[in-house]
Amino acid sequence: MSELEKRKFNAGPLYLAGAAICWSMAGTLTKFIPWSATTVACLRGLIAVLMQMLYTRTWKIKITKPVLLTAICYLGETLLFTFANKMTSAGSAIVLQNTSPLYIMLMGLIILKQKPSKLDCCVGVVIFSGILLSMLDTLRGGELPGSNPLLGNILALISGVFYAGIFFTSRLPGANALQSAILGNLMYVFFLPAVFTDQALLHPETTGVPMWQSVLAMLVLGTCQLGLSYIFFDKGIRTTPSLQASFITMIEPVLSPILALIFLGEAMGTLSVIGSVLVIATIVVHNVLTAKKEEKAAAKA
């Protein structure tokens, strides 16, 4: 490798940071738009799929069983996450969704009969403790805003199950994560009838939010939060080590509640904050220890 190549700047981490920042907008924008969760999720997915197709020039989809399963998981994850953001705090929604490593371990145990390591078991216990703290904060009527915080937290957890399913099915023979994402977004076509009956969309004067602001927020949600973020992630993950990438993308669960607090005045309860810190810190530590273990195994091979 030449000296010039060694000095060549790697923009991968910056692309990943951009992706994480785009992702973190989901909670704030979803709450700001007064339309129903179904309408927001549907329009976001259809706008995003246009960007994905233009960027990848992928107009045809080869549907295999793994591609279809991953697309269904993608649809379930994005739809339920949108509903969760409407009902509970943005911080709780994103952190509870990021409990997916716990479900990946359970899927591996149940489906593949893979016993988790002692480290994985410890991680699972701590993550579950963080979940309990967030749920207790909701049950005691804490500071969490939203129409139904408890149901929102439950939907965020189920969204995490679908999120784990994406990682699980994407590794099956014949899988294609890109085509699954496109197919998953295309499935939102079936939800269009609900969009045309959304009273908040049909009668914007009753929402207190000017129509042009809602439309602008929707465009940002579809193009930047979901569409552009994918492009950034695709570019960044190619040249960034997995451990560094996992650290950088942790910007999302940290920044999401901050944006909600700044722009919406939304604050999480004390127990939810503690639970969120537990979950995020545990995932980071797990990534570090797993990466070191893999490096040692590779060195011995």
Image (tube, rainbow, N blue to C red):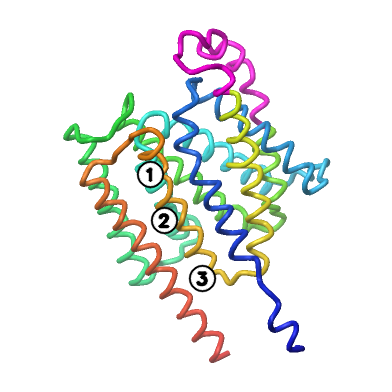
Q: Amino acid at mark 2?
A: Leu
Q: Which residue is mark 3?
A: 243
Mark toward the viewer: 2 or 3: 3
Q: Position of residue 215 (x, y in %)?
A: 60, 24
Q: Earlier in the sequence, mark 2 or mark 1?
A: 2
- The range drawn in magenta is 187-214
Q: Position of residue 109 (x, y in %)?
A: 43, 60
Quarter of the figure that contains the C terminus: bottom right
> Dot 1 surroundings within 10 Å: few (below 14), some, or many (20 or more)?
many
Mark 2, residue position: 106
Q: Distance of mark 2 from mark 1, alpha carbons?
A: 28 Å
Q: Looking at the rendered structure, which numbered label has been put on residue 13? A: none
Q: Quadrant of residue 173?
A: bottom right
Of the residues under marks 3 and 1, which one precedes in the sequence? Answer: 3
Q: Nearer the viewer, residue 291 or 161?
A: 291
Q: Nearer the viewer, mark 2 or mark 1?
A: 1
Does 263 lie within the magenta span?
no
Q: Residue at x 78, y 49 (%)?
A: 56
What kind of element bears circle 2? helix
Please give the name of the residue rendered at 74% of the width and 82% of the height, measured from the top-left corner.
5
> Which residue matches tag 1?
257
Q: Main secondary structure of the magenta part?
A: helix
Closer to us: 237 or 108:
237
Residue type for callout 1:
Pro
x, y percent for residue 257: 38, 44
